[in-house]
Image (cartoon, rainbow, N blue to C red):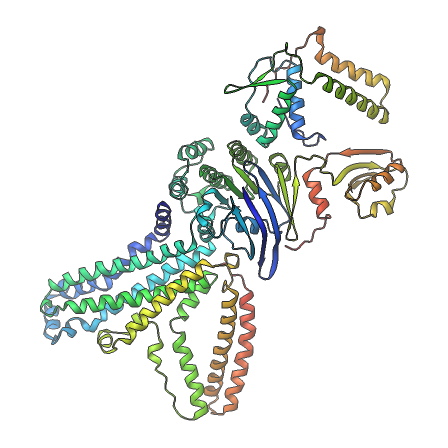
């Protein structure tokens, strides 16, 4: 399920990118599964189709999804390595750094931060496998 | 492309539009915002040829809609209340529109009114406000005109009808229709629009939605360490949106650089947090939060 | 063009009750009336009436029925003009029409043709019916084809002229109410002005100054009965034709330039506001002078000027307020 958070600092298209990656990580969206079309997703979220199209372009650029002409958009196969791996990894590392600065600035304890990280790890690296138990669908 | 060029319009000797220029590219959604009486409706009606401009013009692919009204087959104006259609049923409206707009898509119209449960054979006058708007917008979109101008499409209708209206609009954009939507529903416009036109004192400012920070101002939540700095708060670059206890919600302008932000940082406030700048905040910022405004 | 069909359809939709009422009312005033006199009445009364007839003019009752029919048609056309222009300024109809992909001239042309068509249709139908009724009646020997044709053309031209004035007035005035008032005033205005000027000149000269007042009244359809039509010569025909042409063209031009943003005001054009203002003050001043001069029976020229000044001052104030109004109807 994708929801737009109007209180978020992220622009809408980045929220869509992020939520779709999350749904894939949790296994809600399976590899090679058909994605909703730009038109469908825009109608469901009531956002500008151009914004959804931009999010899909970004996801495709990163190799998260692939579009097949005349057939639609599909979740990429796991074998194909994520696009722009280096760039995305270094951005991820920087994001984590920023989060830690913010946590420290807010006076969050080391134990608390560790607990949070463990919680998130438990969500995605359960028994070392990717896969989610959430029943929610993209909607 | 629908281009508004140096449009001037006075009503009863009061200038309402002063040298308004902008362009609507095919397939884009533009939101038109402004205070009540700021001239939103006047602008839409002048673009639709209901009003004649005092100077300037409205050009569709380079041709004036005022000099060659036939080209308005590609422009539909949907007023805030479809009064003119009150005496007709949706069915009769469809037949009328089919005579006016050569590409009128009867099948699509039937599909839309079926989806929204609009009674095809009851007079528009007898429908609820939300249904009136849905009927009007369905007609407008079924014309397959390239440009649809909407005046307050979601004003005064219930949340379900509003969702349905927005769905119709999003679907139209997916088909490549260009929308210009005058509205006070900032949240909806923010999600729908590619571009925001803010009309203020007869002038139109253009804001591209694509730039999320909008660059012009930041919204901050601040708790000062000790006494609040009255002089800093009173400076023209700072606007207090809200003040509850010791927590201030502020807008700080960046139009003249980040000096004011630097000053704030040097004060070492207990809390200094950036909040997302919503369209509504920008609107408040531009209007200085004042409640009085002429048109 | 398809869009013309749409425009016609709209005009018909909003005035269809008039389309049915018009020929019916026309028939009741003319053919129905004649039917009553010569077919349905008691035989002894029909015989008495027949005995009193010495000429075809007696048989046709000097055109009285046609006069009644013209008055009826004029009222219908007055209402039609209000529906077509004044009411549309109020109910969103005009803004809808102006947003359509066609010129305003074309919209006006449709409205005008609709009214003229209704008039023509009702006249053709009812003239034919009336002729048939006369030919089958005891007065058949007095049947005159040119009587019917005279009546037909006179009614057509005078009513078309008056209808065009009603529409033209509608294109200039900003609301239903002001269109109604101006439309009723316009046909008698020249006569009123002439009358006031004549009184002013008479007072100053101590002699009677005569203007050909009658010819300035544009309510031709009401004014003339048949012998008068015959006696009046070509002037009324030429004058009506001129009024018809000028007000049709004037309405077309004014509708094309309508300032829809001024809907609700007395008058939508700033220039016409000035004309109305000046005209209203002048007429009120003259009327004020005439009133005080006559009322006090003093026949003093000073009293005339007191009334003149008072009339001007009061009317200037009144019209200033009126011009700022935005009427809801």
Please report the residue visible at 67 percent of the width from the left and 18 percent of the height from the top.
Answer: A22
Q: Residue at x 66, y 10 (%)?
A: A131
Residue C155 location (% of width, % of height): 26, 67
Is C34 displayed left or right of B220 in the figure?
Answer: left
Asked whether C262 or B178 is in front, the reply is B178
Q: From where the camera sits, is residue B56 visible? A: yes
Q: Position of residue A107 (x, y in %)?
A: 86, 25
Q: Is residue A26 above or below residue C51?
A: above
Report the number of discs.
0
- Residue displayed at 15% across by 67% down: C145
- On screen, B172 above or below B202? above
Q: Residue furthest right?
A: B226
Q: Position of residue C301 (x, y in %)?
A: 50, 91
Query: From what the image shows, is residue B143 above or below residue C193?
Result: above
Furthest residue toward top: A127
Report the residue that reaches farthest toward the front. B62
Direction from residue C175 to residue C49 in the image, left or right: left
Q: Is residue C229 left or right of residue A38?
A: left
Residue A46 appears in the picture as rendered:
no
The relative height of residue C213 versus residue B22 in the rendered view (above or below) is below
How far across and how far down the image is residue C44, in percent?
10, 69
């Amino acid at each position: 399920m994708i929801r737009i958070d109007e209180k978020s600092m992220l622009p809408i298209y980045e929220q869509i990118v992020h939520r779709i990656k999350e749904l894939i990580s949790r296994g809600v969206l399976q590899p090679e599964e058909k994605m909703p079309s730009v038109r469908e997703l825009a109608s469901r979220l009531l956002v500008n189709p151009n914004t959804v199209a931009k999010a899909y372009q970004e996801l495709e650029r990163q190799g998260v999804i692939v579009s097949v002409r005349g057939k639609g958009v599909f979740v990429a196969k796991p074998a194909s390595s994520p696009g722009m791996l280096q760039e995305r990894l270094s951005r991820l590392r920087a994001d984590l750094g920023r989060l830690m600065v913010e946590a420290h600035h807010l006076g969050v304890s080391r134990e608390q931060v560790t607990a949070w990280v463990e919680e998130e790890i438990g969500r995605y690296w359960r028994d070392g496998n990717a896969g989610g138990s959430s029943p929610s669908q993209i909607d | 492309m629908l281009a508004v060029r140096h449009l001037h319009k006075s009503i009863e000797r009061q200038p309402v539009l002063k040298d308004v220029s902008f362009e609507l590219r095919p397939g884009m959604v533009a939101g038109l915002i402004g205070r009540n009486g700021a001239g939103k409706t006047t602008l839409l009606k002048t673009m639709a040829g209901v009003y004649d401009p005092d100077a300037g013009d409205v050009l569709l692919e380079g041709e004036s809609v005022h000099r060659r009204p036939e080209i308005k087959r590609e422009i539909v104006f949907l007023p805030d209340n479809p009064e003119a259609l009150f005496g007709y049923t949706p069915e009769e409206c469809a037949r009328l529109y089919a005579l006016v707009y050569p590409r009128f898509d009867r099948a699509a119209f039937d599909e839309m009114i079926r989806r929204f449960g609009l009674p095809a054979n009851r007079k528009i006058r007898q429908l609820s406000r939300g249904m009136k708007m849905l009927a009007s917008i369905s007609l407008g979109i079924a014309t397959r005109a390239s440009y649809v101008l909407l005046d307050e499409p979601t004003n005064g209708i219930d949340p379900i009808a509003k969702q349905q209206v927005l769905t119709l609009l999003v679907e139209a954009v997916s088909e490549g229709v260009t929308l210009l939507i005058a509205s006070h529903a900032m949240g909806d416009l923010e999600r729908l629009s590619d571009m925001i036109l803010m009309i203020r004192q007869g002038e139109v400012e253009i804001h591209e939605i694509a730039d999320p920070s909008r660059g012009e101002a930041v919204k901050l939540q601040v708790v000062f360490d000790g006494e609040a700095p009255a002089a800093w708060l009173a400076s023209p670059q700072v606007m207090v949106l809200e003040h509850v206890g010791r927590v201030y919600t502020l807008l700080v302008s960046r139009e003249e650089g980040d000096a004011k932000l630097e000053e704030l940082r040097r004060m070492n406030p207990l809390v200094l947090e950036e909040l997302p700048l919503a369209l509504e905040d920008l609107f408040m910022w531009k209007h200085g939060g004042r409640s009085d405004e002429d048109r | 063009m398809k869009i013309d069909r749409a425009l016609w359809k709209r005009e018909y939709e909003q005035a269809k009750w008039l389309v049915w009422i018009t020929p019916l009312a026309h028939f009741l005033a003319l053919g129905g009336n004649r039917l009553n006199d010569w077919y349905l009445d008691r035989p002894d009364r029909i015989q008495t009436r027949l005995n009193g007839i010495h000429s075809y003019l007696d048989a046709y009752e000097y055109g009285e029925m046609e006069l009644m029919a013209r008055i009826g048609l004029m009222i219908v056309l007055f209402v039609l003009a209000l529906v077509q222009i004044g009411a549309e300024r109020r109910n969103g109809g005009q803004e809808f029409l102006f947003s359509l992909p066609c010129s305003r001239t074309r919209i006006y042309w449709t409205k005008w043709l609709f009214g003229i068509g209704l008039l023509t249709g009702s006249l053709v139908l009812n003239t034919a019916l009336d002729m048939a009724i006369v030919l089958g009646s005891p007065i058949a020997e007095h049947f005159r084809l040119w009587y019917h044709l005279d009546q037909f053309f006179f009614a057509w031209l005078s009513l078309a002229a008056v209808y065009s004035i009603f529409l033209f007035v509608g294109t200039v005035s900003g609301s239903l109410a002001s269109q109604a008032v101006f439309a009723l005033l316009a046909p008698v205005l020249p006569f009123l002005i002439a009358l006031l000027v004549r009184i002013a000149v008479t007072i100053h000269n101590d002699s009677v100054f005569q203007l050909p007042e009658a010819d300035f009244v544009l309510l031709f359809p009401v004014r003339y009965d048949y012998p008068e039509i015959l006696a009046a010569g070509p002037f009324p025909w030429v004058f009506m034709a001129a009024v018809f042409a000028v007000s049709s063209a004037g309405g077309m031009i004014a509708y094309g330039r309508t300032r829809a943003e001024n809907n609700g005001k007395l008058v939508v054009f700033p220039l016409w506001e000035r004309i109305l203002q000046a005209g209203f003050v002048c007429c009120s001043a003259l009327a004020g002078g005439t009133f005080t001069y006559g009322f006090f029976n003093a026949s003093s020229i000073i009293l005339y000027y007191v009334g003149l000044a008072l009339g001007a001052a009061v009317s200037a104030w009144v019209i200033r307020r009126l011009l700022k109004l935005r009427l809801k109807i």
